[in-house]
Amino acid sequence: MAAKPKTDKEKLKQISVRGIAQVEDVTTIKESFNRHLHFTLVKDRNVATQRDYYIALAHTVRDHLVGRWIRTQQHYYENDPKRVYYLSLEYYIGRTLSNTMVNLGIQSQCDEALYQLGLNIEELEEMEDDAGLGNGGLGRLAACFLDSMATLGLAAYGYGLRYDYGIFSQKIKEGRQVEEPDDWLRFGNPWEKARPEYMIPVNFYGNTERRDGKTHWVNTQVVFAMPYDSPVPGYKNNTVNTMRLWSAKSPNSFNLTFFNDGDYVEAVLDRNHAENISRVLYPNDNVVEGKELRLKQEYFMVAATLQDVIRRFKSSKFGCRDAIRTDFSAFPNKVALQLNDTHPALAIPELMRLLIDVENLEWEKAWDIVVGACAYTNHTILPEALERWTVDLLQRLLPRHLEIMYEINSRHLAQVAKRWPGDMDRLRRMSIVEETHGKRINMAFLSIVGSHAVNGVAAIHSSLLIKKVFQRLL
């Protein structure tokens, strides 16, 4: 009997990788380990440290990822599936080495190879620092989703920030807990690959001007977003997806004039201000400066991500004759933007800005595209944890986006008034703009209005959202 043809989903799930042995033998791993110790680290067994051995092992394991990683991206380009873009300010991925060995099915071979070399694999695994990219359940769920999507063979990308420091490192000194900086990158990260060729400008501050029938965001301050890619391997299926994290870089990293005048602090001030954006996970927001930095982090991530997403959408081989896709009506069919809590909610006005100000689409068409592409996951029903940003801060930092959010709210309330005429209390409670404790934008309401799907992290949570938190929007 003829074999049943594979579905498109099954084809995506198992990606063939030519030239890669499915079962790695111990001898090959030992040779690769010694090669990296010698050529990558420029060490021999007489002077190498435990950390050197860990890095050599990490590079050895990564070698088995590279072919699969490249082939996966080629496969997505050739088949042009709908891509999932998971936007999250946290990824609690833990340690990468052991997870990668398990997913590639080479853990026992690596264990045996190191045993024959007189090394203990468990001791080397302990040398890896936990990635300082997340803190709790939100970040852990994001990391699990990336693993699951790779295992299911989905064309998925995780986008976030590459923090220099995690939330803190806990130490016990003289019987007391003390918090120290979590400098998880102090020894480098063998799993990431910098992509300076895809560096993207992100704008802040400035003002808007109306010219030639269009709104222009002018007099802005620019910060560059440098992408760093890390592999996300599926479980024994040859799929390796990508987690792309953005690091903030200043366009003016060093002022020689100030330096020559002896003002050494001022010489690097611009760089420090810019790079503070990706400096630390959860800056202290008890002060105004901390709140502004947090909002900068959120916008920086979504602005860089959406420019990258649109670039990839346009470069599809199934675009028009010159290989540039310009018809954005296909965007929701090819792009899914999953907002992990309200932190990436600015993706909604940012995508609107890109479509109407840059791509010159009409508002109605652009809005249909945004709603069709965006979906929102809520993580908490606690009122104090639902983000609200003051209008004053948004006006100073993102003036164009505030205008767009006002327009979104105006059109949203027009629909409410049409459905419930004369119900002023409903208009007040369903407004994205709150005015009870100063003028603020309710980012959860913005996420709901601008998304085609909303869910909690479990079925019972989704039910609670409907019954308790967001009944105001029903």
Image (cartoon, helix red, strand yellow):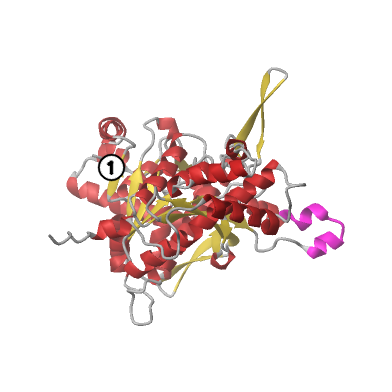
Residue 147 on the magenta segment: no
Three-letter residue code for mark 1? Leu
In the image, is residue 262 part of the stretch drawn in magenta?
Answer: yes
Residue 302 or 63: which is nearer the viewer? 63
> Could you tell me residue 207's position as x and y percent?
53, 61
Percent position (x, y) of residue 73? 42, 63
The extreme bottom residue here reads 321
Which percent across, then down, holds residue 203? 55, 60
Task: Decide: is 121 above or below 77.
Answer: above
How crowded pointer 1 is (Cα within 10 Å; few <14, some 14-19, many 20+) is rated as many
Q: Is residue 430 above or below residue 191?
A: above
**Above-or-below relation of 327 to 270:** below
Viewer-proximal residue among 406 and 374? 374
> Measured along the vertical axis of the image, is residue 312 above or below residue 122?
below
* Quadrant of the image containing the C terminus: top left
Q: Where's the N terminus, which quadrant?
A: bottom left
- Where does residue 255 sit, x and y in percent of width and height? 76, 62
Main SS of residues in magenta:
helix
Residue depicted at x 18% and y 47%: 419
Q: Which is nearer the eye, 389 or 462? A: 462
What are the residue bounds of the magenta stretch?
256-269
Q: What residue sits 28% from the left and 62% below the top?
A: 333
In the rendered image, which residue does mark 1 sit on?
427
* Residue at the image point whose x is 36% and y is 39% from the top: 378
